[in-house]
Image: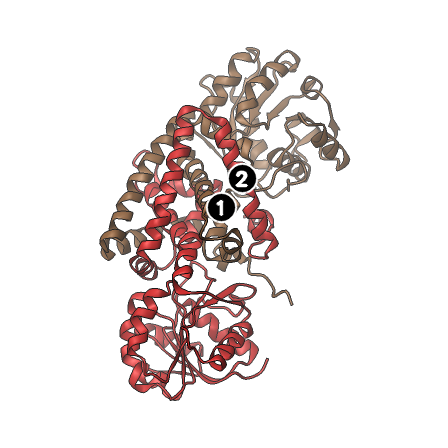
Chain colours: A red, B brown
Amino acid sequence: MSLLYQRVAFIGLGLIASSMAHAIRRAGLAAQTTGTARSLETRAVAAEIGLVDQVFDTSAEAVAGADLVVLCVPVGAMETVARDIAPHLARGATITDVGSVKQAVIDAVAPHLPAEAHFIPGHPLAGTEHSGPKSGFAELFDNRWCILTPPSGVDPQALERLTLFWRGLGANVDLMDPPHHDLVLAVTSHTPHLIAYTMVGVADDLRRVTDSEVIKYSAAGFRDFTRIAASDPTMWRDVFLTNKDATLEILGRFTEELFALQRAIRQGDGDLLHGYFSRTRAIRRGIIEAGQDTDAPDFGRVQKKQD
Amino acid sequence: MSLLYQRVAFIGLGLIASSMAHAIRRAGLAAQTTGTARSLETRAVAAEIGLVDQVFDTSAEAVAGADLVVLCVPVGAMETVARDIAPHLARGATITDVGSVKQAVIDAVAPHLPAEAHFIPGHPLAGTEHSGPKSGFAELFDNRWCILTPPSGVDPQALERLTLFWRGLGANVDLMDPPHHDLVLAVTSHTPHLIAYTMVGVADDLRRVTDSEVIKYSAAGFRDFTRIAASDPTMWRDVFLTNKDATLEILGRFTEELFALQRAIRQGDGDLLHGYFSRTRAIRRGIIEAGQDTDAPDFGRVQKKQD
């Protein structure tokens, strides 16, 4: 893999930025990396573990001389960051981000950037429930998808370079227009997260079933929801506030379907339930075949007996 | 581990029965195992791979001389099986089952069994999305919980022996009364499954987002739902038909909470969302600490790049 950028600057040093930093080193994609984060503690940890070559206290310092700037902050913080870095960007720099919503990021960031900056929004579809500068690992993006939503009139060379960069990080790259991205993600990510948070909230809140029962007996399905519902609260608050319309549309479809199944349960309509439950198996097979999940029993997480 | 039963008979040879058969051999818990299944193909596969010592065409033959009979069929098939085996049971045999609902199994099975049989319903909280006689593995129950719901007046020795048996299979054993079991499982398993099925159904059904998009971009949350929603349709139909009241109660609570979050999204109430999303992290920590899930990033299922 060849060198693609001289200096890559990360604004925000959480799971995605730290995984990118590791993957950049793995593939030798950049001569130098810099970074900053709002919290002093995050900056101190990042410096201590040598996550990037230089950790700065301000985003102005971090982006100086960078030919690629990656915004890795929650969607709600994008506008402030864009305003802060704009005067300090190197001429002809490419600016990208990793936010889970794209139209809102474009609306927040684009107006503040200088005309000669190449702004190419992006979203790597990968993650774990862990956060912070220590949570990253080089393999996070391997065989996952990164969606770029370049504006019309994007510089073809800048786009080509960013595409090669993401491939170098291990990902496959797709292009999409921002509203379609936001709808697709409302289906595959945002609504599932809201539902998981809700289910965990219900379990936590019941009087007649104790938390310790919920925890002990979670292996029968519930625990998969808790992993999703352990994701970063600030990031997810911003996702729902900024992808409101698409999320509400999919939620509406979801409750409609849920009520139909609820009615079938109440009426004892076994045929409807069996038909519904059979239909959903095909998508699972598709996901395994596309290499987006493992077919290992229980994700291969069966543990050794602890005695 | 010492020999606990002379002859263990399985009625039904799917994931749970086949995992029990492997775990029995691992620990040397029974002198002999037998089994039968309704489908000729399942019986042929089980015989071919030597899953149990003897595969029979009828449940009457399978249970003859068995001191432990394990009913491993969908809840809706329990009554027929109980009626079939009752005249052929050995004197003093223990009858148990692995059904996901307990009160309905008791109502279906108990009336048909001879008075001297020891009927001790059970439910191992373990599983994968795979089905059939080849899907079992000896480690499935390791460090998982098995809930037994013995009737009042149960023979203490029969209960003690079955408890040791499940411990020998790797599980921890708890006792519970049947209605409480059904409520706990409605929270930790049945409602999560229904919700996962619904979400996958919605995704499958949308016109504006294609199936191939759903599949490609599933790693951002959706794929965890598809694993749950790939479980056996017949088993799950029977669960919802037979644990109707508890499931409808929890579903009611779920939609109430979901509407509150939906309203917060519509009104842009970020504080409510952030508070809700923060609260649910504690349960996740409890589950990891209780050894009921792995803390490995992405369940450790990150794949090597396929090029």
Tell me residue A184's x, y (percent).
Answer: 43, 56
Tell me residue A142's x, y (percent).
Answer: 55, 66
| Three-letter code, disc 1 | Asp
User: Which residue is more in the foreground, B255 or A187?
Assistant: A187
| Three-letter code, disc 2 | Arg
The residue identified by callout 1 is: B204
The residue identified by callout 2 is: A279
Tell me residue B140's x, y (percent).
Answer: 58, 42
**Element marked by disc 2:** helix
Q: Is residue A289 above or below residue A100?
A: above
Give residue A211's quadrant in the image: top left
Q: Quadrant of the N terminus of chain A?
A: bottom right
Say which residue appears at 39% left-offset and 48% top-offset.
A196
Q: Residues within 10 Å of mark 2 (few under 14, many from 20)?
A: some
Circle 2 chain: A
Q: Is residue B136 above or below residue A271?
A: below
